[in-house]
Amino acid sequence: MDQSDLLRFVTGALGRLQIRHYVTGSIASGIYGEPRFTNDIDIVADVQDHHAGGLLNAFPADRFSSQPTTTAGCTTGIRSPATSHVP
């Protein structure tokens, strides 16, 4: 899956689950400003507890690798889990 396919897959899954989200980082910079090529996709999503089951189904463990959520050193209460695509 190339980066544009992955972006469509992820934003499509978030949309189907009605999770508010936006794309940021190098992809947004490339569209709205100066292109940067970092070979990653940055998405901010308003994930709530009730989304957990849908997310697990949308991003199966055999195709995606997730790291646990952490709030260490975070004063805003924003959690930042990391999920990676496994080709």
Image: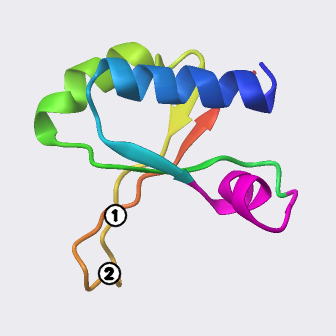
Tag on residue 74? 2
Between marks 1 and 2, how big is the CA–CA gap? 9 Å
**x and y, in percent, of residue 78 in the image:** 28, 68
Q: Is residue 36 above or below residue 49?
A: below
Can you tell which quarter of the image residue 32 is in? bottom right
Image-quadrant location for residue 16:
top left
Which residue: 25% across, 80% down? Answer: 76
The three-letter code of the residue at mark 1 reads: Thr
Residue 4 shown left or right of residue 76 in the figure: right
Q: Residue drawn at (30%, 71%), measured in percent from left and top? A: 71
Depth check, front residue: 49 or 46: 46
Relative horizontal placement of residue 46, taking residue 68 as reference (left or right): left
Quadrant in which the C terminus is drawn: top right
Give the secondary structure at mark 2.
loop
Taking the image as shown, residue 19 lies to the left or right of residue 30, namely: left
Position in image of residue 22 (x %, y %): 46, 48
Secondary structure type for disc 1: loop
Residue 29, quarter of the rendered image: bottom right
Amino acid type indicated by mark 2: Cys
Residue 36: say if magenta: yes
- The image's mark for residue 70 is 1
Is there CB contact under 8 Å for labels 1 and 2?
yes
Against 25, is 50 above or below? above
Magenta-colored span: 24-37
Which circle marks residue 55 in the picture? none
Looking at this view, is 9 or 28 the one in front?
28
Q: Residue 79: x and y, percent?
A: 31, 62
| Image quarter hosting the N terminus | top right
